[in-house]
């Protein structure tokens, strides 16, 4: 199973009852054989350009693990899901993630030494 990052832009009118479209996205992932490691709601944000006559969308980020055939299934299903304006499904860059963790660790060490 490979690790992926999935960012979903949900229709802004569904912000009131966000759990229903999120349950649908979670169901799409688990039906394809994936597991959700992390879920983070980034909230309603302004879009850089209009998508389906909308200026805003609710951004939700997922860290997921998927078998090799699942990304195509998920992409095909999200393409026809009305609640989802756009999505981005990418393979996790392990080197980039490690570099970010190292940078955070170094920053916290330098903050600790400055306090002394």
Image (cartoon, rainbow, N blue to C red):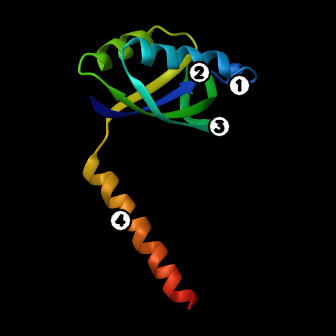
Mark 3 vs mark 2, foreground winner is 2
Figure quadrant of residue 90: top left
Residues at marks 3 and 4 touching, judged by CB atoms closer than 8 Å: no
Whether label 1 touches label 3, CB < 8 Å: no
Q: Secondary structure at mark 3?
A: strand
Q: Secondary structure at mark 4?
A: helix
Q: Nearer the viewer, residue 23 or 10?
A: 23
Q: Which mark is residue 43?
A: 3
The percent position of residue 54, horizontal first and vertical second, equals: 62, 23
Q: Position of residue 7 (x, y in %)?
A: 47, 32
Image side of residue 18 versus residue 64, left or right:
right
- Within 10 Å of disc 4 (Cα), the crowding (few <14, some 14-19, many 20+) is few
- Counting residues from the start of the chain, the first of labels 2 and 4 encountered is 2
Mark 3 vs 2: CB contact within 8 A = no
Position of residue 15 in the picture relative to residue 114 (left or right): right
Q: Are marks 1 and 2 in contact (CB under 8 Å)?
A: no
Is label 1 or label 2 in front?
Answer: 2
Looking at the image, which residue sits at the far right?
16
Distance, label 1 to label 2, CA atoms, is 10 Å
Corner quadrant of residue 76:
top left
Distance from the alpha carbon under mark 2 to that under mark 4: 32 Å
Sequence-wise, the earlier of marks 1 and 2 is 1
Q: Which residue is mark 1?
A: 15
Q: Is residue 15 left or right of residue 77?
A: right
* 3 or 4: mark nearer the eye: 4
**Residue for badge 2:** 22
């Amino acid at each position: 199973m490979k690790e992926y990052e999935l960012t979903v832009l949900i229709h802004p009118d569904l912000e009131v009852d966000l759990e229903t479209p999120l349950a649908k996205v979670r169901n799409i992932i688990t039906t394809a054989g994936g597991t959700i490691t992390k879920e983070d709601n980034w909230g309603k944000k302004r879009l850089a350009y209009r998508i389906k006559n909308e200026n805003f969308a609710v951004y939700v980020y997922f860290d997921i693990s998927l078998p090799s055939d699942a990304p195509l299934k998920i992409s095909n299903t999200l393409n026809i899901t009305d609640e989802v304006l756009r999505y981005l499904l990418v393979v996790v860059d392990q080197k980039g993630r490690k570099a970010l963790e190292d940078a955070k660790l170094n920053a916290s060490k330098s903050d600790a030494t400055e306090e002394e």
